[in-house]
Amino acid sequence: MIQAPKGTFDVLPDDAARRELIEAQIRRTLGAAGYRRIETPTFESTELFARGVGEATDIVQKEMYTFDDGGGRSLTLRPEGTAPVCRAYIEHGMHKLPQPVKLWYLSSFFRAEAPQRGRYRQFWQVGAEAIGSETPETDAELIVLLADLLDALGVRGLTLKLSSLGTPETRAEYREELKAYLRAHESGLSPEVVGRIDLNPMRAFDATERRTRETMTGAPKLLDCLMPEDAEHFAQVRSLLDAAGIRYELDSTLVRGLDYYTRTVFEFMSDALGGAQSTVGGGGRYDRLIEQLEGPPTPASGWAAGIERIMLASEQRNPAPELVDLFVALSVRDGVQGAFELTYQARRAGLQAQLELAGRSLKGQLKHADRLGARYVAIVGENGQASLRNMQSGEQLETELQNVIPTILRSSRL
Ligand code: AMP
């Protein structure tokens, strides 16, 4: 049996119906704030991600599905949405539009990660980007929008973690300071952490070993090293969130897995997810990315949230079943042409109509119509005759085929 590739999944009809509700909510929440939808191609030049996401990141080093297009060009299935949206912003000259340009997307992404619950190789993300503004209110608005969206979707047990990364220069200086601290306190650190001092000193904050954790309480924090303008920007983001009643935890060790962030960064975690994959969504400011992609210097901010994780962390709400106004049944095979025509005419008149397609007995057809919750069943006989049964009242009307649709429409208007 041929199966779907490891780490991928089928979206079956019940699941698709739930996703449609999520999409409708996304449209309402983001549309109301003036964000408009954008969709970029499923694959892009590999160079876009190498430059945009950062050569040294896990995504670019290990997780991209990269292939040759047969003409010597290297293409990659998109692992994330921000770099493609920025590419589109530059390519379509969107800097000439009133700024910021506010965009959202709902698309599938691809990462060659080890699959587990909440982590797949093809997954869906909703993302929002506000490109062309450096104000703290842009960051705060984006955070409030994601908080409202997750709330409207019923995501449980949320915590918001917030920090500021300052500029890449501040980060480079801070890294040296942290390395110096770790070197000076090697005796209080686990050998594993010591081994990673040069490669990834920030990981020392994630250590679980007691002695290492104690040592790390005295380590310098990035938030204390910000330049005055960056610290002021962050203070304003915080005060706007405070005023909006959004609760957050400051987390000076928050480092996102992508290189392009500057200043504000945040993550929404849900304890309903449990374990390692507890991040529902996150984002931040990326003031240098557009320039890095050869666009005009343009500040920007945005976020992305995983649809499958939203679904895992929210209460299962079963979408209302689809309505069936009319089920068209056949009492004799000769009636098929009239039944076929009645069905499509009913649809053109705006009714939800289904035709018997499986050759069931009349009894079987009525049972099926009942299971579908059909309001009416038309049993089509010979010579343009039909019995129209009201499934709620049980009343049955013997009539001509051409009267079926007007009768149902009249009853719907009552
Ligand atoms: P990132 O672009 O890594 O910040 O991811 C944003 C969000 O997308 C995460 O918080 C997750 O909800 C979701 N996500 C990222 N990677 C995966 C994956 N491999 N499978 C499912 N969801 C993912």
Image (cartoon, rainbow, N blue to C red):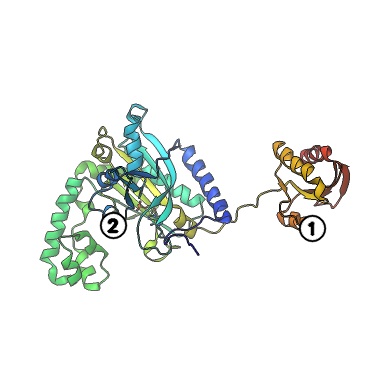
Q: Disc 2 on helix, strand or loop?
A: helix
Q: Is residue 386 left or right of residue 78?
A: right
Q: Position of residue 145 (x, y in %)?
A: 43, 44
Q: Amino acid at mark 2?
A: Lys
Residue nearer the viewer, 170 or 199: 199
- Could you tell me how far apart the alpha carbons at marks 2 and 1 are, in whole angstroms? 58 Å
Please give the label number shown on residue 256: none
Q: So how many labels did they put on this image?
A: 2
Residue nearer the viewer, 196 or 377: 377
Toward which corner of the image does residue 14 lie, by quadrant? bottom right
- Tell me what residue is drawn at x 25 percent, y 73 percent: 210
Callout 1: 10 Å neighbours few (<14), some, many (20+)? few
Q: Which residue is mark 1?
A: 361
Residue nearer the viewer, 111 or 1: 1
Q: Is residue 21 above or below residue 8?
A: above
Callout 2: 10 Å neighbours few (<14), some, many (20+)? few
Q: Which residue is mark 2?
A: 62
Residue 213 at least partly seen: yes
- Tell me what residue is drawn at x 23 percent, y 46 percent: 166
Residue depth check, mark 2 versus mark 1: number of the one nearer the observer: 1
Q: Position of residue 357 (x, y in %)?
A: 71, 51
Residue nearer the viewer, 141 or 97: 97
